[in-house]
Amino acid sequence: KRKKCMNKLNLSQFTGSQNFYPFTFTRTSVLSEGTRYIAEHLEAFWLMEKIDQLVRAIEREGKDVSLMVANLKPDGDDGAKLKIEDGDYNVMVEDQIKFTDLDFDRIDGELTIWVSPNGQGFTLYLPSEY
């Protein structure tokens, strides 16, 4: 079963990032302050890695990845669905996550992360940080 809500994350505090944090094996993709906060407080570095891998796969297919939108929603008792769209709401990939203990109650039931190229890899950030 999923972990239960300790306290809601205050994501409204993130309106821009001054600092970025490498997180992939190659250290070319980075997290903004807001996405790092989520990864740390929800133990969700795995999710950031998964988003990065899926966007890289879309890029390898030759698709435009100038703005990708990743959305994670709970699905069933223990699973989740990760959907990645382009900036025009076209679904590029959907991934079924069979098990996660991510506490969706702490993020108002779903999570949206924007992804943009940074010249070497990708930057993952909250929409409020754009």
Image (cartoon, helix red, strand yellow):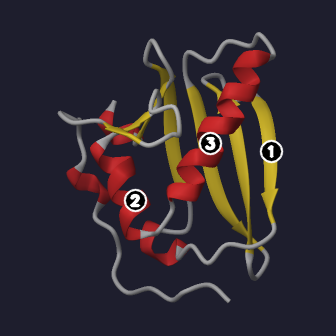
Judged from the image, the secondary structure of the residue bearing numbered disc 3 is helix
Circles 3, 2 touching at the beta carbon (< 8 Å): no
Q: Where is residue 82 shown, x and y percent of the image?
A: 71, 51
Residue at 33% x, 68% y is 9
Q: Nearer the viewer, residue 41 or 104?
A: 41
Up/down of 92 relative to 71, above or below: above
Left or right of 95, for residue 71? left
Of callouts 1 and 2, the N-terminal one: 2
- Compared with 98, 32 (above or below) is above
Q: Amino acid at mark 3?
A: Ile
Residue 104 percent coordinates (x, y): 54, 72
- Report the residue at 57% width, 73% height from top: 102
Q: CA distance from mark 3 to mark 2?
A: 14 Å
- Residue mark closest to the camera, 3 vs 1: 3
Residue kind at label 2, given as amino acid type: Ile
Please identify the quadrant where the N terminus is shown.
Answer: bottom right
Q: Which disc number belongs to residue 38?
A: 2
Q: Earlier in the sequence, mark 3 or mark 2?
A: 2
The label number, if any, that marks residue 94 in the structure image = 1
Relative depth, front residue between 3 and 20: 20
Question: Which residue is outermost to the left?
Answer: 18
Give the mark, 3 or 1, whose residue is nearer the N terminus: 3
Q: Classify residue 12 by image quadrant.
A: bottom left
